[in-house]
Amino acid sequence: MAPIYLPFAASILLALMAAISGIVWHYHRKHLNLLCLAGGLLLAGCAQAVYALWGAQAGWGEHVHMGLLSGAAAVAVAQSVAMRFGRRVQVIWVAAGAGVMAVGAWYFMLISPSAHGHWVVAALGLALILGHVLPVTWSLASRHRMERMLLLVYTAISALVLCSPWLNAEAISSQVAAWMWSLLIPLSGGLLVAAMVGCTLTDGLPVLCTGLDRDALTGLLSRRAFDAVCGSHPATQQISVLVLCDLDNFQRINNQFGTTVGNEVLRSFAQLLQSSVREGDHVARIGGEEFGMALRDIDMDNAQALIQRITHSMRQQSWGGTVANGEQLTASFGLAMVRENDSLQQGLHRADVLLCQAKDAGSNRVGVEAVAAGSAPSFG
């Protein structure tokens, strides 16, 4: 009885954790990584339910279902962690993991039947999907300590998946293996949910930086402090992308709704920018409705993904009553790569040119410096 009912208990616990992630996402809509995590936990719970129903009597069809559900769960969980750090899961690694699982399942179920061999190839495939996120995310700057806790938990889960064949080896009785999985799977899922939710809630805490000039209205770095933290040559500070952004038609909002609403819009936008970047990144109010960001250890594709998340969050947010009155706030952005010998002023100048070109092309546009030499900038 225990080997059957305990996996069902694990499925129920995973579903509850998915519900927690979904509820927190509902109240923090900009954190789509929580929605991906909820989906991954639900898929993992469904895979456990299939195992609970069939167990050792599982045939080819049941193993295929478990493999598909487990693989999809691994992709969703990896995507969730990658999104948290401004990255994304590479399709090639997903395809490689799925290929290993498919070829291994075919070989060990049709050519050389072996339950232990099936576990080995399944673990290798899932580990390929989960593990490729680790080298990049561990090397990136984090916002706060909770993100380091998230990485530790995710690393432990990846190691658990890789070691899973030995947890189901023939030397261990099926009942003991069922007990171990019934404890380990919901425990690891619960730790992941706790770390991810902790990161989300910590994002909402005020950023405290002493010894640096702050803008009185928004609490962001002042222009002088921004210049100081970036240094004369940003590349030496591992700053790889400089961003300038300007709120579109802000003066019209100021004139129509008054400076009180205008100031609240500036504060809300500043909080959105600050909560969207990592601890090692810098955000400043350059002047008026213009803001700057210095992003460390990031390529242009991921910098663009960050800006897309910001613009998406802007569409979901209420701006001091302006949305209720039919005025949707948008912003334009200019993104410039930092070259090895660039001075800060050179990098900001290129970002400013791209910002001006984006605004000339219309509101809610992003000007991106082409990485390839000689190619024209793109606007979205």
Image: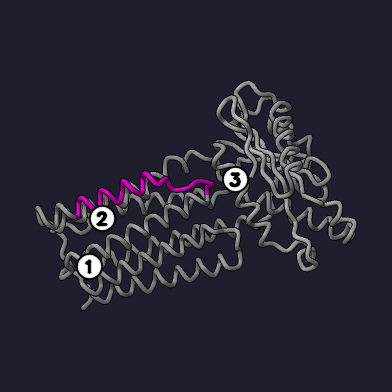
- Residue 47 in percent (x, y) is at 31, 66
Say whether residue 94 is magenta: yes
Q: Mark 1, mark 2: which one is toward the viewer? A: 1
Q: Amino acid at mark 2?
A: Ser
Element under label 2? helix
Q: Amino acid at mark 1?
A: Glu
Instruction: Check if mark 3's residue and mark 1's residue have beta carbons within 8 Å.
Output: no
Q: Report which residue position mark 3 lands on.
A: 278
First reached walking from the N terminus: tag 3 or tag 1: 1
Q: Which residues are magenta?
A: 85-105
Residue neighbourhood size for the residue with mark 2, other residues' Cα within 10 Å, grouped as few (<14), some (14–19), many (≥20):
some
Q: Kindly identify the residue that appears in the image at 30 percent across and 72 percent down.
A: 49
Q: Kindly identify the residue that appears in the image at 75 percent across and 36 percent down.
A: 225
Instruction: Check if mark 3's residue and mark 2's residue have beta carbons within 8 Å.
Output: no
Q: Report which residue position mark 1 lands on.
A: 62
Q: Which mark is residue 164?
A: 2
